[in-house]
Image (tube, rainbow, N blue to C red):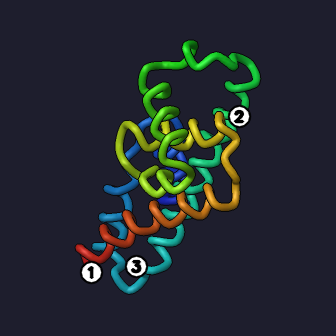
Amino acid sequence: MGGLFISSFISSTLAPGGSEAVLAYMVSERSQQAVSLVLIATLGNTLGAFTTWGLGIMAAKKAPLPSLLSEKNRKALAIVRRRGVWVLLFSWLPVIGDAFCFAGGWLRMPLVSGGLAIFLGKLGRYAAIAWLLV
């Protein structure tokens, strides 16, 4: 289960990963532990998102001009600024999800509501994967 946590953590930072495949394999092998596996994957992925959030905070301090960001991060910044903290429910999306977390940190969004949105979005994604396999 430690491998699932690590895979989920890495998948939610700026590095690509395959936590969904790891979860799918583990649920198919241990379906009676599906709830625990989903919670472990969600926790790892959420903590990885907080790492990306922290990178956003640090980037805003070091290079406060949005024009210095990548195109993907500028787009995410605009979306999060316009839509608010609850867009972080979609932090599980490929490509743009990590940028949403980065933007949340950059914009200094409220950590509690942002963290809740991130957690719920990621929980929903992993629960759906497990539900399809059980």
Q: Which of the numbered marks, if any, corresponds to residue 134?
A: 1
Asked if one can make out residue 54 in the rendered structure from this viewpoint, the answer is yes
Badge nearest the viewer, 1 or 2: 2
Q: Position of residue 6 (x, y in %)?
A: 54, 52
Residue positioned 35% across, 43% down in the render: 94
Specify the amino acid type for callout 1: Val
Report which residue position mark 2 lands on: 57
Check contact, mark 3 vs mark 1: CB within 8 A: yes
Q: Toward the viewer: 20 or 96?
A: 96
Pick whichever of labels 1 and 2 is earlier in the sequence: 2
Instruction: Tell me the crowding category of disc 2: few under 14, some 14 to 19, or many 20 or more residues within 10 angstroms, Cα based.
Output: many
Residue positioned 69% across, 19% down in the render: 64
Q: Quadrant of residue 128?
A: bottom left
Which residue sits furthest front?
82
Q: Which of the numbered marks, if any, corresponds to residue 111?
A: none
Badge nearest the viewer, 3 or 2: 2
Q: Position of residue 80 (x, y in %)?
A: 51, 42
Which residue sits furthest right?
61
Q: Quadrant of residue 52?
A: top right
Compared with 19, 76 (above or below) is above
Specify the amino acid type for callout 2: Ile
Compared with 105, 85 (above or below) is below
Residue positioned 23% across, 74% down in the render: 132
Specify the amino acid type for callout 3: Ala
Instruction: Tell me the crowding category of disc 1: few under 14, some 14 to 19, or many 20 or more residues within 10 angstroms, Cα based.
Output: few
Q: Position of residue 13 (x, y in %)?
A: 53, 40
Report which residue position mark 3 lands on: 34
Pick whichever of labels 3 and 1 is earlier in the sequence: 3
